[in-house]
Amino acid sequence: MGNTLVKSQLNDVKTFLGNAVAVLESFLNETTLSQLSEGSDSDKKHNQVILSNLRKLLVYSEETMDACTIILNSEPFQKPAAEKTLYRVYHQCIEEFFSPKNDAWYEDSRSAYTGKNAIKFYKPVSDSIAHLVKSLEGEFQRMREELEFYETDYRTKMIQSK
């Protein structure tokens, strides 16, 4: 892939991450565990797991956004570093969103056929959490489709270089 295409992809990812960081940061700064449990059937322990996962996603997104910024500002453009960063975004941000390690929620693979949101929660959650995840899902899905190439391409390059 040419430098221009990779650089353009990196710019797009940086914008996507900036938006995700802003939304996550705003939610996490304004929301407390008590607020989430208030007047809903959601359980406190489950909400703790969800908030923990959202904080982890925020940190991953901030770190990879910073990496994108550094690479985009470097001269000459470092294509291998950019590809590695795009691979990292795919695995640390996109995969963490759709399949959190602590099972805060899961992706319903049948959703593509039903036209509904793919993220499903194991237990009832507050409306604010459901709305947050729903608002992020479309962009995360779009970015996953755009970055799937790096998942296989980068892994292939690493295997061939050994």
Image (cartoon, grey):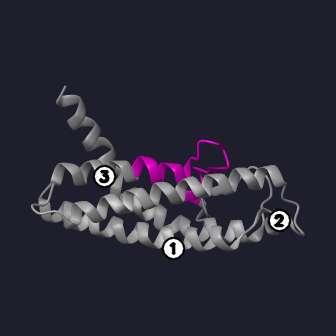
| Residue at x-position 24% and y-position 29% | 159
| Residue at x-position 64% and y-position 67% | 28
| Residue at x-position 68% and y-position 74% | 30
Above or below: residue 56 compared with residue 23: above
Badge 1 element:
helix
Badge 3 element:
helix
Residue 78 in picture, x, y percent from top left: 15, 55
Look at mark 3 in the image and give the residue it sits on: 85
Look at mark 1 in the image and give the residue it sits on: 22
Badge 2 element:
helix
- CA distance for labels 2 and 3: 37 Å
Crowding at mark 1 (Cα within 10 Å: few <14, some 14-19, many 20+): few
Look at mark 2 in the image and give the residue it sits on: 34
Q: Which stretch appears magenta?
A: 90-113
Amino acid on which disc 1 is placed: Ala
Residue 19 in picture, x, y percent from top left: 46, 73
Amino acid on which disc 2 is placed: Ser
Mark closest to the chain's N terminus, 1 or 2:
1
Mark closest to the chain's N terminus, 3 or 1:
1
Q: Residue furthest top?
A: 162
Mark closest to the chain's N terminus, 2 or 3:
2
Q: Could one spot residue 120 in this view of the protein?
A: no
Residue 80 in picture, x, y percent from top left: 18, 48
In front: 157, or 19?
Answer: 19
**Which quadrant would residue 146 be assigned to in this image?**
bottom left
